[in-house]
Image: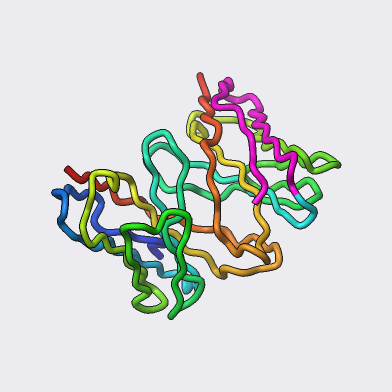
Amino acid sequence: NAGVTQTPKFQVLKTGQSMTLQCAQDMNHNSMYWYRQDPGMGLRLIYYSASEGTTDKGEVPNGYNVSRLNKREFSLRLESAAPSQTSVYFCASSESHYNLGGRNEQYFGPGTRLTVT
Amino acid sequence: DAKTTQPPSMDCAEGRAANLPCNHSTISGNEYVYWYRQIHSQGPQYIIHGLKNNETNEMASLIITEDRKSSTLILPHATLRDTAVYYCIVRVPKQYGNKLVFGAGTILRVKS
């Protein structure tokens, strides 16, 4: 049981290049999330998928696209990378996006460290 | 979601209790208080959550004041491995779903 896995761990891009960050979970969770974390700051939500077949914008969606490929996988795409997208990207999953106060914690992956030059 | 205020940093001696405060004076009646922590370079980890009552699990205790305007996370016997950034988050799961809004958190340094 690996939990949440992310690939790659590190990536360097030139301005204007594109890439896709991959995320997979093996906990049979319905909901998945993409966050970014800039130095010295808390995480900010980019996009989320409450259930397979749905995606919604979070706090900072500009410059990103997502695909919920199936229940296990949720990818984040940068179409034209910019230096402002240099950050650490975390994927997370939870049992359900909507609950009535249960534990429903989010499980986070190890992160992808992206540098755009 | 209600905003939270946490001290930027705290120190704690190894083996002693670490008490991390959080102010959420604008919290509404149906908002839960969640605590996560982030050990250096890793993804955040859930610790505990609560609504009105005090809560305890294998990792920590959560004390919520009667007026719910503040809470304290207690690590009863801090170890060096508890050095991390601790985030206090309040949210309404039914209205906003499971979106977490992270502030800057409190850097807890446990010293031997």
Q: Is residue B75 left or right of residue A95?
A: right
Specify the quadrant of the image occupied by residue B106: top right
**Percent position (x, y) of residue B13?**
58, 20
Please name whichever residue, A65 or B15, is drawn nearer the observer in this view of the structure: A65
**Percent position (x, y) of residue A75?**
32, 67
Identity of the residue furthest to the front in this view: A62
At x 42%, y 48%, the residue is B43
Residue A27 covered by magenta stretch: no
Identity of the residue furthest to the right in this view: B66
Please name whichever residue, A115 or B86, is drawn nearer the observer in this view of the structure: A115
Q: How many marks?
A: 0
At x 77%, y 40%, the residue is B69
At x 37%, y 41%, the residue is A38
Please name whichever residue, A42 or B21, is drawn nearer the observer in this view of the structure: A42
**Percent position (x, y) of residue A63?**
31, 58
Above or below residue B93? Residue B100 is above
In this picture the colour scheme is rainbow
Q: Is residue A113 left or right of residue A71?
A: left
At x 57%, y 68%, the residue is A97
Specify the quadrant of the image occupied by residue B86: top right
Above or below residue B90? Residue B39 is above
Which stretch did the figure color magenta?
B1-27
Q: Is residue A91 left or right of residue A77?
A: right
Residue B5 covered by magenta stretch: yes
Above or below residue B102? Residue A63 is below
Above or below residue A68? Residue A106 is above
Specify the quadrant of the image occupied by residue A65: bottom left
**Percent position (x, y) of residue A83?**
23, 44
